[in-house]
Image: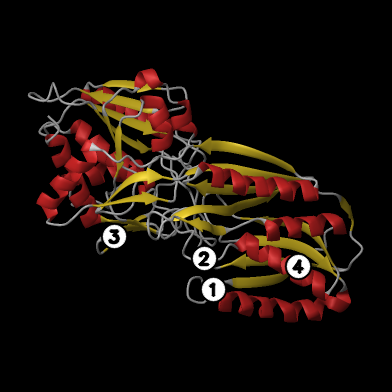
Amino acid sequence: MGNVLSGLQPESVFENFEALTRIPRESGNEGAVADYLVSFAKNLGLEVIKEDSNNVIIKKPATPGYENGPTVILQGHTDMVCVKTDDLEFDFNSQPIPLVIDGDFIKTKGTTLGADNGIAVAMTMSILESKTMEHPSLVALFTVAEETGMDGVMSLKPENVKGDILINIDSEEEGTLLASCAGGVNNIIEYPFETQKTTLDEGFKLVIQGLNGGHSGIEINKNRANAIKLMGRVLKSFEKHFKFEMAKISGGEKMNAIAKRAEMTFVVRRADVETLEQLVPLLQEMFVNEFLATDGGIELVLSEVETPKMVMTEKSARDIANIIRLAPFGVETMSGGIKGLVESSNNLGVLEQTEFTLKLTNSVRSSVNSLKLEISERFEIISEMTGSKNSLESDYPEWQFKLESPIRALMKTVYGEMFNKELKVDAIHAGLECGFLKEKVGDIDMISLGPNLYDVHTPFEKLSISSTERVYAFLCEVLKRLK
């Protein structure tokens, strides 16, 4: 297999990254990449630990003259969000990511790229294998399942990771250091619906598609549509215009991605088919108009299907519509201290139906713990009103800003000298592992950085080649100064 990224600089970083794109590493399926990293470390003669969770820790001694320097933890996660365009036949478990070079960008042919967070793994691998770099003692920490609730860092054994400084490489904007992040929790509603035999005539399927989707933290403030929420509005509109019976409903792919597709199978009276066929284009026109500037590609596709024999009861269908409509989506509060920063939000990410249960998975985020709880309490109220079960999963803490940070100060100095620009310090409305890492490795000096990445968690994800080169050079220079 030829190397698409051959010749790109820094060569070792892109060689390592391309190797990672050939290894399956969807969240929960990191065994192969963990084994790859273990072999990588052993071939270099470095100490390596693989935890039961598939977290991998690799330790590299300080180079001569740096023995008294601080121990630096370089951290990234091995898993990726696996999302593709609706029309693409692709198996993330068996096929390599279809890489494409487009000018300054590495992109794909219709899938997520996995630079979130494969580029961190690749950079760290290059530092570990370098024979010429000067640096203090290093601990490379590669965690798993970051994208689905940070299970890897939650299970991390503290005795395996000791250090004085932690550099997380999971940011997506060059020239901006992150020094704080939101905490979050997955809020689950499970509604036990009831069924009956259909009493109506004609079966149909409605698909809402063509939405941009996006990262439920970083892009939650871009006013993009959520296909599940739109489907909730469709249900209420149908209720007003004709009798219908719902058989199946689903939407979204990942709890931390804005839902870009939803579909429903339902039955109507033969006499109402014409009304249905007239209403659907009107709903599409309304949605497109509402999101014209931010998500104008919305499509509502109606097709005839075999009439389902069993459908949900009228009460169950109404309850489901109410849950979807009442579930918060989007920005809830903005930060009063950092201009433009989303403080609290919710994403209704996944709607899935089993035989007798409808499950709605929400990603609640906030940099203020009490506001995170307040949003979750609203789901408790919705559940009480509809007879649903409500539960919380993968609760993770926020990472609070520190007034004093030597690594931040050093990075600002080095960046100014290298690029003649001021390094921005910011916070992010997304979950980084730094909150949990603070609990695991102690309240040490932490910072987060990364190269320019765009449209992560979508099939349009892309990584800047030149930005990667600059950020890697910057990171190497910072390590060189930590004597």
The numbered disc on residue 236 is 4
Task: Specify which label sits upstream in the sequence, 4 or 1.
Answer: 4
Report the amino acid beneath label 2.
Answer: Arg
Question: Extreme top residue here?
Answer: 159
Q: Nearer the viewer, mark 2 or mark 3?
A: 2
Between marks 2 and 3, how big is the CA–CA gap?
Answer: 24 Å
The numbered disc on residue 439 is none
Question: Extreme left residue here?
Answer: 65
Q: Is residue 366 above or below residue 58?
A: below
Q: Nearer the viewer, mark 1 or mark 3?
A: 1
Q: How many marks?
A: 4
Between marks 1 and 3, how big is the CA–CA gap?
Answer: 28 Å
Look at the image and tell me whether residue 255 can be seen. no
Q: Which residue is mark 1?
A: 291
The numbered disc on residue 105 is 3
Report the amino acid beneath label 3.
Answer: Phe
Between marks 1 and 2, how big is the CA–CA gap?
Answer: 7 Å
Badges 4 and 1: C-beta atoms under 8 Å apart? no
Which residue: 56% across, 61% down? Answer: 260
Badges 1 and 2: C-beta atoms under 8 Å apart? yes
Which residue: 36% across, 26% down? Answer: 442
Q: Residues within 10 Å of mark 1 (few under 14, many from 20)?
A: some
As helix, strand or loop, the secondary structure at mark 4 comes to: helix
Could you tell me residue 68's position as x and y percent?
A: 13, 21
